[in-house]
Amino acid sequence: MAPIAAALAIAVLVAFAYRAAFGYGFLAWDDLTYVRENALVLGHRWGALARAVVSHNWHPLTMWSLAANAATPLSPAPFHATNVLLHALDTALAFALAWRLSRGRLVVAAFTALVFGLHPMHVESVAWISERKDVLHAAFYLAGLAAYVRHVDRGAARFPWGTFAMFALACLAKGAAVSFPLAMLAIDVWRRRPLLDPRLVREKLPFLALAFIVGMIAIDAQHGGTAHGLLLASAPGDVVAALPHSPLLRLAMPAWGYLHYAWRLFVPSGMSPLDPWPRAADVSPAPYVLALLFLLATLALAAWDARRSRVVTFAVLWYLGTLVFVLQWLRVGQAITADRYTYLPYIGPAFALGIGLDRLLARRRAAGLVATAAALAFVALLAVRTTTQVAIWHDDVALWSRAIAVHPQATLAYVWRGNAYAGAGRMDDARRDLETARRLGDRGAALWTGLGIVYGSTGHADSALVMFGRSLALAPRVGRTYYDRGVALALLGRRREALDDFGRAVALAPGMAAQVRGASGAVREVDGDWRGASADLEAAMAAGARGPAVLYAHAVARLRLGDTTTARDDLRQALRYDAAHASSRALLDSIGTGPAPLRPAPAR
């Protein structure tokens, strides 16, 4: 019972460290794509989600889990709670895996689980809703490896079907699970299994075959493909780009990630949600060559240890095996490194350190107690850093302020914070950040969209149209930008064009239906298209629009169509939302004392 109690206690401690995340909201960064504007998730379209490529990733189990959290009205709380609980479960599974690998050494299992659960580098995977794929796939990954250790220790001759099933589920949650056979290899080396034994080779073939298939699908999706039409792509384009560096540096870039993550394991500071690629002109070869030497040195040390304790060998094989596919051999995305890539790799080194601590306690009691005190101090430091790191993910402004503090020249961070300021109505702050990004050289679609929102919100709709046009020229399939441009067109009285843009916005971003249909209904009312306005406003309410403004607008349209009963019901409901809503009160009083007015008072 002691190991079960210890695992549960550590899992509870980990969940407590993340308690602040339960009250956080959605972020603009990918949470729009994964949840808030994803019609498949919001509509619980399970079949379509099985084929959907979202943000250039195919991970149906992840998308199903997000859809299971989606309700009306949409709330971020279930998403955050699920992420934290999955991380607590992963911590317990890390304990179970280390327990089996160490043949029941409590110190080893506890230290491994504490480092895994409380390391601040893992906050990104837990506090960010869009990284559900990390915490979900790890549950299957770790459960599968724990089953594999049991299979190995029993010397079972049968194929490990339970392990294979967990591996398959992990792949359906995140494509990076293809590293699973390499983790199996690390376990085989740790258990001194004969790697070239024909039975062991045959045992691995199904795992390698599935890893190859899933890997090919993942690469195709990253390049904007649909696996020959089997999948549904959410957006065109290619997130893989060439590296603008010399061949030597292109070879050394993955080694830099290998060294960077190893350093952060022991020195958990300076973390940022964005570690941008260095500009070719700013790159000094020395750090990257040093990183390459570090990689070669650890590999040599692992080879030397293979005939000895195998502790270092296991740590290096696990760390490199679970990290190798995210070491930026090709340029993918905007960042050279990302905290979330360490979610599984740190288990190997933590396990090796736990083995060392346990052996020291057994052989040299005094030194072991000193080492235990140091280990506990390190875990306490991790816990403190995790609580402060969780706070960074509170909202978009806090997130990107942290990125700017660490990387003052990161143009994308200024763009994202500027757009966050604009969303909060802080237009002066938004303009300052966006102009800073432009001065630093950014010319991306998000920059022009942000400037368009700032101009439109400050009464410069003509300038806003120019900015939105530049954005759509670069990214013509972003529904939110069409919505923003439609609002600017409506402000300029170009209502037909505004309605066209609203139609494109709904087609490209169905998750915005409530907002877009509400705006479209308001424009149609100005044109006197009462029937069209009524239909749009009903669609907005069906999509989740609530509050007195939309109900009042729908009441006006229904009155114009002679439907006094529905109008009266709408107005009463509007007053239940806001008893002080003057327009609804005045119109309801008018309906109750005489004929319906031909010109209802404007909403305010």
Image (cartoon, helix red, strand yellow):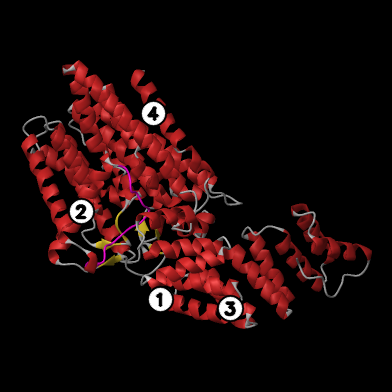
Q: Which residue is mark 1?
A: 474
What residue span does the magenta drawing correspond to?
268-280
Q: Position of residue 367 (x, y in %)?
A: 20, 20
Please report the residue visible at 59 percent of the width from the left and 82 percent of the height from the top.
497
Residue 322 image offset from top left, x and y in percent? 24, 45
The residue indicated by pointer 3 is 460
Q: Residue at x 31, y 42 (%)?
A: 268
Under circle 3, the secondary element is loop
- 135 up-or-down from 592: above or below: above
Q: Are marks 4 and 2 in contact (CB under 8 Å)?
A: no
Question: Where is mark 2, residue-wise?
Answer: 256
Residue displayed at 70% across by 63% down: 550
Which residue is nearer to you in this view: 565 or 198? 565
Main secondary structure along the magenta-highlighted residues = loop
Q: Where is mark 4, residue-wise?
A: 10
Q: Are marks 2 and 3 in contact (CB under 8 Å)?
A: no
Q: Is residue 238 left or right of residue 568?
A: left
Mark with earlier residue (1, 3): 3
Task: Specify the quadrant of the image occupied by residue 103.
Answer: top left
Q: Secondary structure at mark 2?
A: helix
Q: Residues within 10 Å of mark 4 (few under 14, many from 20)?
A: many
Identify the amino acid type marked 1. Answer: Leu
Q: Amino acid at mark 2?
A: Trp
Q: CA distance from mark 1 to mark 2?
A: 32 Å
Is 269 part of what is drawn in magenta? yes
Task: Tell me which amino acid carries mark 4.
Answer: Ile
Q: Is residue 508 at all visible to an observer of this figure?
A: no
Reading the chain from its start, which is encountered first: label 1 or label 4? 4
Spot occupied by residue 199 in the image (x, y as percentages of width and height): 12, 37
Q: Is residue 177 left or right of residue 74?
A: left
